[in-house]
Image: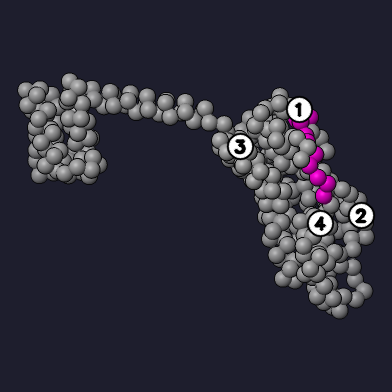
Amino acid sequence: MQENLSLYYIFYVAGKTGNISRAAKELFISQPAVSRAVQKLEDSLGTTLFKRNSRGVIFTPEGKLLFEKLKDAFALVAEGEEAVMHSNMQQIPHLRLGTSSTLCRYVLLSHLKPYISSHPQVRINISCQSTYQTLQLLEEDRLDLGLIGRPDKLRGYYFHPLMHINDTFVATSQYLANQQSLYPDTSLYQTATFMMLDEKNITRQTINSLLKEHHIELNHILEATSMDLLIQFAKIGLGIAGVVRQFVEQELHEGSLVEVAAGFDFPAREIGFVCRKNHADSPLLKYFFSEI
């Protein structure tokens, strides 16, 4: 039987495709080679396995019986291969990271480069979503580590502070000058377009809370899905953007953007790495929880 294994597989593929030509393409061999292999197997078994017609091949009763047995056998082979590959995959260290697109660009990337250098064997997956969605994925054990803005309540998690950030309003000098020229006696809150992240974002929630606390209502709001867009919109003079100050320091230094007086102070907020408490000692996470 051992010398016939390749013949059995060629017969199986020919039966599966129902056509010698298609079987040859799938097996990357010539059509005559497929026909010779089937003929050789038929001679070995002393029976006819296929009947040929203009459309291809059809099984004889003996051929159908053999095909069904081979189908089960090759399915077991495929299952075994998949099990071995899955076992190998499980042996590869795998780190699942979650954060917002903003924190990914402005904070996480600078920490990933040295981590990858010191942990080249670790396979890393990164998903981008809001802080609350990241915490939900951690709770469901679909993430190992998150980079988030610290929410008010954080029970059941280990949080490692990384840096403090401050929110601010920014715009171009020209936009502010135009607003002053058009509406000299009216508050910017009434006339300007304020560009903000969506309501699920902690930056937006912080700004909303401060505006409510100071009894300020915005008349014109434009929402964007990322802070990068807000910054670019502000730079082309589209309006006033609510952003994290630390992420526009270059623009402020160059003068392409200026800070807009809000009439109140933005409190400092913490961002940091977070995981479930029972995962805090994981060797894969030690780098992110160490003092750098």
Mark 3 or 4, closer to the camera: 3
Residue 238 can be seen, yes or no:
no
Mark 3 sits on what residue?
119
**Real-space CA distance between mark 4 and mark 2, rounded to the nearest whole angstrom:** 13 Å
Q: Which of labels 4 and 2 is toward the front? A: 4
Amino acid type assigned to the residue bearing label 4 in the image: Arg
Residue type for callout 3: His
Residue annotated with mark 2: 265
Q: Is residue 157 covered in magenta?
A: yes
Sequence order check: which comes first, mark 4 or mark 2? 4
User: Which of the two discs, 3 and 1, labels the residue nearer the N terminus?
Assistant: 3
Q: Earlier in the sequence, mark 3 or mark 4?
A: 3
Disc 3/disc 4 C-alpha distance (Å): 32 Å
- Closer to the observer: label 2 or label 3? 3
The stretch in magenta equals 155-165
Q: CA distance from mark 1 to mark 4?
A: 30 Å
Quick one: SS at disc 1? loop
Would residue 41 appear left or right of 263 to someone viewing this image? Answer: left
Of residue 45 and residue 181, the one placed in the foreground of this image is 45
Tell me where residue 260 appears, x and y as whole percent: 86, 64
Amino acid under label 1?
Gly
Question: Which residue sits at x=68%, y=55%?
Answer: 226
Residue that mark 1 sits on:
156
